Image (cartoon, helix red, strand yellow):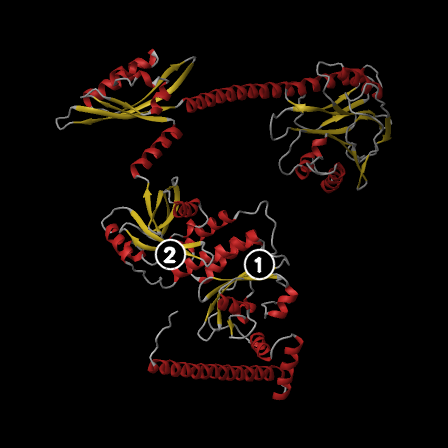
Amino acid sequence: MTSEYVPAADTGAVAELAALAKIVSRQRAELDRLRESVAASAVVERAKGALMATTGCSPDAAHEALVQRAEAGNRTLLEECWLTLGALMPTLPATPLPAAEPTAPARETPARLGTAEILGRLGKALLHVGSPQELAGTLHEQLAPRIDADAVLLYRRLPGDGLELVGQAGLDAMLAAQWRQVPPLQRIAPLEVLKAGEPLWLEHFTEDRQAFQLIDEPPGHWLSRAWLPVSADTVLGVLRRPAAPFGLADRELLQSVARLSAGRLGALGAPAEPVSSDFSTAVQSVLDALPGATVLLSPLRTAAGEVEDYRIEAATPGAVDILGRTGRELIGSHILESYPSVAGESLWHGYLKALGGGEPYEGEPFVYEEIVAGVTVTATYSVRAARLGDGLLVTWLRHDTEERQEQRLAELQRLGNLGWANWNLVTRQVNWSSQVYTILGRDPGRGAVPLDLLPDLVLPEDAHALARAVAELARNGRSFDVPFRLRTGNAVRHLRAVAEAVSAADGTVVEVHGFVQDLTAQRSAELALVDSERAILVQRGVLDAERALAARLQHALLPLPSNPVRLHGLRIEVAYLPAQAGVHVGGDWFSAIELPDEAALFVVGDVAGHGVDAVATMAQLRFTAKGMVSTGSSLTGALARLNFLLLHSRDAQSTATLVLARYDPAERRLAWAQAGHPPPLLVRGGRAYRLDRPAGMLLGASANPVYESAEFQLEPGDRLLLYTDGLVERPGEDIDAGLDRLAAAALAAGPATLDALLAAMLAGERRDDVCVLDIRVPVEDEE
């Protein structure tokens, strides 16, 4: 057994130092208590003064009110004073944080993202973060759909253990201002987290409210919350409305987010102090002489031994991070600070695999965003990581520019359906891209074709033009752009060849380069367009001829009198107006004739449709109706026979409406019948009447229709209007509205001519033909 020899003088000195340390410790504790007491007294006095200023109460009443509020809220007097000062401040602080919009209730997402994916997205988003406030907003945006985060807060510890809110998202402006400064009090969750260095999960609101002073306005607004240390002086808070625990995956995610935020905050502030060692110095001396981007990383581990980040110990001059730092400037910074988007990516897991297993990691090429001259650009990299000592030697290989250009050229040829070709006229060497073989339908195994033999591949009728262009190019260097056709299988393809010459100093053409393009699809579309235009022109000619024929036929069948006519003492005025759109001829017609028994027949009819067929049906009905009534048929009998005729005509699908009226001049009696036609309008004595229609279905609608007739006596001064529906119908309007409009226009027109009435009724474009018979009974003076 041995014992350590300690000289007596040294033992006494140790005891004296220990006693002195205890005295210093007691004095420091007493000083801290004194400082806290002074600070607390100042806070209480300020709170009392604020309460007195707003309520007008006395100092004692203000103190009593603060005590009662503290007891009611289960808070200390000092905590209540701080809350009172925050709630009573009339304006925001002089330099308030940017206000965040209130967060909407958590929304359901179709599928929640995995931890790796959300960390990857967050890492990319952090590239654009320039302040702690922007960091809070980015975290809130990324975490809200994943864990229902309603608010995100970043607090930084101040000298004296107070807290300052440096970033927030999800709080309204007043609440953020109230909690912007937090004093060094007891039961403040963020302070407890910074002191312990461990996350704090508050998932039981009722118990947590008793244990901690919570940010909670209105009360019960956030029922679960988490606080996590980001660095030695920064803490991250996540507030949620659901009263649900944070699952294991959510906790792991938030811890990873905290580590990721630490790297970004480090990049925003001062960089970490450089780490120096003999090993890293030796590696740096080697890397100084190497090209490309290579760094030496040492892992940073948690208390549990998990790698949470890497520190850069050495770097080549070509290494660069998102902030533009290069080479030795990177030494001491962290990977999540310099390259935040690798978090959660396969690259991060590759680092871990190489560090743990010893086998080098070689990643697949990937696209990475970087900042160049202030602009975000993308580049493609491959990464190799190999263990070196206790760290990793990581090399970033940017894809060769020439290789990327070749890839883009291949894509351009494929999308443009073209391929490049090169002919060396000196060495007779020919180079074609693979797309040329595809366009020409040539087997690559047969090789490329010399320039002078290229015309042999095309159709004989196009070979001469291409051969002449090739000869001019080879002899005089004249470039060409020649279309030609090529037969591949049973199809003919339309191609285009474009070429230009490269000449020697003496003007001799030594090389030709150009491209071949497949224009088959374009040419097919052009030919189809030409055929379509030709068909349209033919159809237009047919329509024009049909219009002319129908118009001449209608004019021959339905001549219009240029002036009013007299018939058995009645004054008759006629109008026929074709529609303004489409074929300008239709099936509307009229008749006003004298019958053999010295009566008069008035007819107005309307055949459905337009064009030659409608005119032909109109002529058939018009002449048949006149013939039947002239030979003694009754009005209803004539309608029945016309219906039978229409049902058994060549166009059995046609329908027509009709009004027949027979006027007896001796008794001035008018008998009339109708087949689905608008009622005549009678104007008499300053009033307008719609005649009650007798029964009658439109022609061609039924094999057994019933037709009835009615009669009334005309009086001097009467005006009777027979018309087709084009006069009164309007799209989207009830027919009664049109009939009322006609009655009002007829009364307003008075004794004016029919033209005045039509002008009032037909303002604007018409969609149907209009035919009107205006029958007037002269007064005794006019007869």
Using the numbered discs, state the Cα–Cα distance from disc 1 to disc 2 in whole angstroms. Answer: 30 Å
Contact? badges 1 and 2 (CB < 8 Å): no
- Secondary structure type for disc 2: loop
For residue 334, which numbered disc appears in the image? 2
Please, is residue 401 above or below residue 506 in the view? below
Examine the image and state in which quarter residue 491 appears.
top left
Q: Residue 6: x, y in percent?
A: 35, 77
Write down the quadrant of residue 151 in the picture. bottom right
Q: Position of residue 487 (x, y in %)?
A: 38, 14
Is residue 138 something one can see in this rendering? no
302 or 718: nearer the viewer: 302
Looking at numbered disc 2 in the image, what kind of residue is underneath it? His
Figure check: 646 above or below 36: above
The x and y percentages for residue 351 are 40, 47
Nearer the camera: disc 1 or disc 2: 2
Checking the image for residue 150, the label placed there is 1
Q: Quadrant of the C terminus?
A: top right
